Amino acid sequence: MERYSRIENKHKREIVLLKARPCAWSKCTFCDYIEDNSTCTEEMIKINQDVLSHVTGEYGVLEIIDSASIFELPQATLSLIQQIIHDKNIHTLFVESHWIYHQRIQEIRDFFGIDMIVKIGVESFDDDFRNRVLNKNATFSSIEELKKYFDSPCLMVGIQGQTKEMIQKDMDILTHHFDYGTISIYRNNSTPIKRDESLIQWFMQNYAYLQDDPRYDFLCDPTDFGVGD
């Protein structure tokens, strides 16, 4: 399992994949990422200390990801991140959170006290597909409400049940309303939710240009950031 990497295109930054407690939601139908979590605090703290020891601060920008939300990390790890921010002159921090924590986002911004890009796994702006099919429990009522809390939506493309119209709308909303975002091509995993190859082929024919858009990370595989397995 790779847990430290550098992202050297677009928004240059260091990225770490940390060990966290189980996701507070843990019911998304497409997600087996949560298998990386732990209930042993000592294990989490030890692994995270080792991973964070690789941070150099060379870009002044750090991204923290885990198998859940930033709020599922042990307090000792959060405090260590805070110390690294100070010691390594980090000026911008990327983190991710589930919608269920939206009312605590300002709390985590205040805790770290630097510029932050807070990401959220939206997967699709189609409310029915997002919440009924993918079971995201991301129940924001409008783009304006989402933007009150989060800076960067993560969208998935190429899932059976998605349509071209859904994806067109997703890309339109992303490009007209957000200066940050992640577009991920769906990869089959251990869940029953499967990849739609023909939809992915259509998407790449029509939206491959977004790979060059400096605002958005574009992942053809979930490991393209250099972490995970």
Image (cartoon, rainbow, N blue to C red):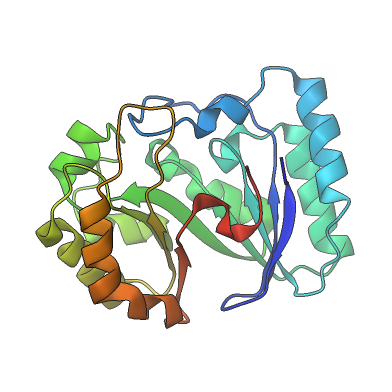
> Does any portion of residue 173 appear in the rendered image?
yes
> Does any portion of residue 144 appear in the rendered image?
no
Residue visible at 85% across and 40% down?
A: 49
Residue 27 image point, x, y percent: 37, 25
In the rendered image, which quarter is residue 157 located in? bottom left
Looking at the picture, tell me which residue is in the foreground, 166 or 121.
166
How many tags in the picture? 0
In the rendered image, the vertical position of residue 193 relative to residue 170, given as above or below:
above
Looking at the picture, tell me which residue is in the foreground, 160 or 24.
160
The residue furthest left is: 165
Residue 213 image point, x, y percent: 42, 81
The C terminus - image quarter? top right
Residue visible at 56% across and 26% down?
A: 35
Residue visible at 20% across and 55% down?
A: 142
The N terminus - image quarter? top right
Looking at the picture, tell me which residue is in the foreground, 213 or 90.
213
Residue visible at 83% across and 59% down?
A: 55
In the rendered image, which quarter is residue 148 located in? bottom left
In the image: residue 20, left or right of residue 51: left
